[in-house]
């Protein structure tokens, strides 16, 4: 999948939520993804830059993008076809 050709199917805005809630909510939301759907997550929790990608990979999801602009970190996560 070429990330440049894809748009998120769902968006989860967790800005302002304290850690560890962004990571927990992201895991719950990822479980509802169908194959190749993309979840965009917005968070301003500093610890999430480590926890969200690590949790996603550990659970078999693909991290397509991690981008930080100021305090906001944007994640794009997808459920690969092999899951």
Image (cartoon, helix red, strand yellow):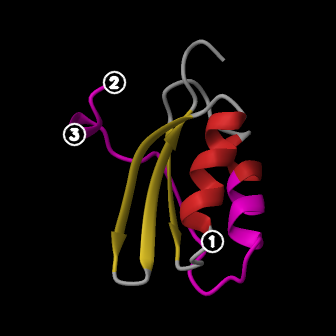
Above or below for 79 versus 73: above
The residue at which mark 3 appears reads as: 4
Which residues make up the magenta segment?
1-26
Above or below for 12 versus 77: below
Decide whether residue 66 is among the magenta residues: no
- Give whichever of discs 1 and 3 has the lower sequence position: 3
Q: Position of residue 14 (x, y in %)?
A: 60, 74
The residue at which mark 1 appears reads as: 47
Q: Secondary structure at mark 1?
A: loop
- Mark 1 or 3, closer to the camera: 1
Above or below for 76 versus 62: below
Which residue reaches farthest bottom? 16
Which residue reaches farthest left? 4
Above or below for 11 versus 68: above
Give the quarter of the figure containing the C terminus.
top right
Image-based side of 72 in relation to 7, left or right: right
Q: Position of residue 40 (x, y in %)?
A: 48, 55
Q: Residues within 10 Å of mark 3 (few under 14, many from 20)?
A: few
Q: Secondary structure at mark 2?
A: loop
Q: How many marks?
A: 3
Residue visible at 54% across and 23% down in the picture: 80
Mark 2 touches mark 3? (CB < 8 Å) = no
Q: Which mark is residue 1?
A: 2
Marks 2 and 3 sit apart, C-alpha to C-alpha, by 9 Å
């Amino acid at each position: 999948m070429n990330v440049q050709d894809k748009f998120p199917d769902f968006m989860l805005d967790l800005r302002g939520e304290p850690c560890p809630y962004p990571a927990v909510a992201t895991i719950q939301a990822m479980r509802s993804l169908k194959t190749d759907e993309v979840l965009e997550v917005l968070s301003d929790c500093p610890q999430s830059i480590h926890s969200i990608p690590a949790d996603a990979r550990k659970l078999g999801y693909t991290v397509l993008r991690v981008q930080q602009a100021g305090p906001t970190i944007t994640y794009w996560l997808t459920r690969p076809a092999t899951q």
